[in-house]
Image (cartoon, rainbow, N blue to C red):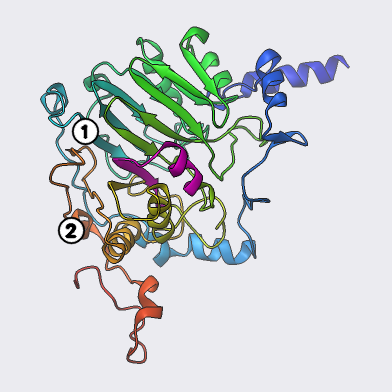
């Protein structure tokens, strides 16, 4: 027994700090009381969810690691990050709502005099280790400290590309409040966030921060940071309502019918921040394609084009087999077809949804040509051997 205790103690010492902490005590008791927790795990809406690559692992590995395919998944040059300055963010938004995509799912939303920072990841890698794991494909647009005061930090779930240890530790030294899904607070407390600054919510619960009402809403995904995925922390999308404006952040999610209910209960929204990257046929239940992302936006808006869609969760990390710029091209096409306004800012480029939207396909200057497989079914006449030659520059 002594040997086993020593081994267990040694493994704890080797456990990376980025793994965080498992929920326990009253936090775990609250998790077990959740109507969404059953048989020892949180349950997704819409039934069983495939959380790992389906089909042959050999085929997946062949697709993911093949040399030519790997080259497609990164930019060919320097990503044109917007040179955001402190002055850009110091003046109040003229319309009361300004949004700045910082890359991947990190977004600063300035809404009705308050500042909300979603899924901030300023670290170099989305990984528990500083020497391995997906590395940034572009720098952060500006230092975290240059953002200025933030009223509330919102976390969608505990995966490394959404919950970043060095970023949270830096924000722990500020006065900001953290709104997180049920169970995720255990990680933050482990990293130095005082319990009094945590608002930990189950789906459909809300909290008020200043003049804002934040609601955790359902998503179709999963959780996990350590060697074992215990499904003991929840994942969520979020709505934020101010005095004049409403916004939505999808976090990570597969497409499901619940977007219609979220829209009916909390919408319509001035802007939605929708995950449209890191999709694959190997995991269709937990991430959306751009076409599904546009459909989700329309569901959230009552079925009709309304507000602005901001594509997120793409361009910053290499997390899936698709080409680096494919999410941008596909979202642009899907938005155009639906008649839906889509904002396409460079990382760090602020915009106001009711003003002129950034619409330049900036990624084309550093992208390999993009085939458009999503257009195959719409073509009536295609020459043999030309099926995949719809290039990004042809508009």
Which residue is at 68% across, 13% downward?
26
Mark 2–mark 1 distance (CA, rounded to whole Å):
26 Å
Residue drawn 46% across and 29% down? 215
Q: Quadrant of the C terminus?
A: bottom left
In the rendered image, which quarter contains the N terminus?
top right
As drawn, the label of residue 365 is 2
Identify the disc placed on residue 216.
Answer: none
Residue at mark 1: 98
Q: Which stretch is magenta?
A: 259-277
Name the quadrant containing residue 56.
Answer: bottom right
Can you say whether 382 is above or below 201 in the image? below
The percent coordinates of residue 224 (x first, y second) are 60, 35
The reply, left or right, for residue 101 in relation to residue 63 is left
Q: Position of residue 109 (x, y in %)?
A: 28, 30
Q: Residue at x 77, y 16 (%)?
A: 6
Residue 303 forms part of the magenta stretch: no
Residue at (23% x, 50% y) in the render: 344
């Amino acid at each position: 027994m002594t040997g086993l205790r020593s081994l267990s103690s040694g493994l704890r010492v080797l456990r990376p700090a980025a793994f965080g902490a498992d929920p326990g005590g009253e936090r775990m008791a609250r998790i077990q009381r959740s109507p969404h927790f059953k048989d020892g795990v949180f349950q997704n809406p819409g039934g069983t969810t495939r959380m790992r690559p389906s089909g042959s692992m050999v085929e997946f590995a062949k697709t993911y690691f093949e040399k030519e395919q790997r080259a497609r998944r990164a930019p060919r040059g320097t990503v044109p990050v917007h040179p955001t300055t402190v002055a850009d963010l110091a003046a109040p938004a003229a319309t009361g709502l300004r949004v700045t995509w910082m890359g991947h799912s990190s977004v600063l939303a300035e809404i009705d005099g308050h500042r909300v920072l979603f899924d901030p990841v300023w670290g170099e890698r989305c990984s528990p280790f500083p020497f391995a794991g997906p590395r940034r494909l572009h720098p952060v647009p500006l230092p975290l400290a240059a953002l200025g005061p933030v009223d509330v930090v919102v976390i969608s779930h505990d995966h490394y590309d959404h919950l970043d240890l060095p970023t949270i530790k830096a924000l722990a030294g500020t006065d900001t409040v953290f709104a997180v899904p049920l169970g995720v607070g255990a990680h933050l407390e482990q990293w130095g966030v005082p319990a009094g600054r945590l608002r930990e919510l189950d789906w459909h619960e809300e909290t008020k921060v200043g003049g804002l009402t934040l609601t955790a809403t359902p998503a179709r995904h999963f959780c996990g940071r350590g060697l074992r995925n215990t499904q003991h922390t929840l994942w969520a999308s979020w709505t934020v309502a101010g005095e004049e404006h409403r916004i939505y952040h999808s976090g990570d999610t597969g497409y499901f019918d619940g977007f219609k209910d979220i829209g009916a209960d909390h919408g319509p929204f001035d802007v939605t921040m929708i995950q449209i990257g890191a999709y694959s046929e190997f995991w269709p239940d937990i991430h959306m394609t751009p076409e599904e992302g546009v459909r989700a936006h329309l569901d959230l808006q009552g079925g009709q084009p309304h507000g602005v869609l901001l594509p997120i969760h793409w361009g910053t990390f290499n997390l899936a087999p698709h080409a680096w710029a494919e999410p941008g091209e596909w979202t642009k096409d899907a938005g155009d077809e639906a008649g839906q306004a889509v904002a396409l800012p460079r990382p760090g480029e602020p915009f106001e949804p009711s003003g002129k939207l950034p619409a330049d396909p900036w990624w084309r200057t550093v992208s390999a040509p993009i085939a458009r497989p999503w257009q195959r079914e719409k073509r009536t006449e295609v020459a043999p051997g030309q099926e995949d030659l719809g290039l990004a520059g042809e508009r």
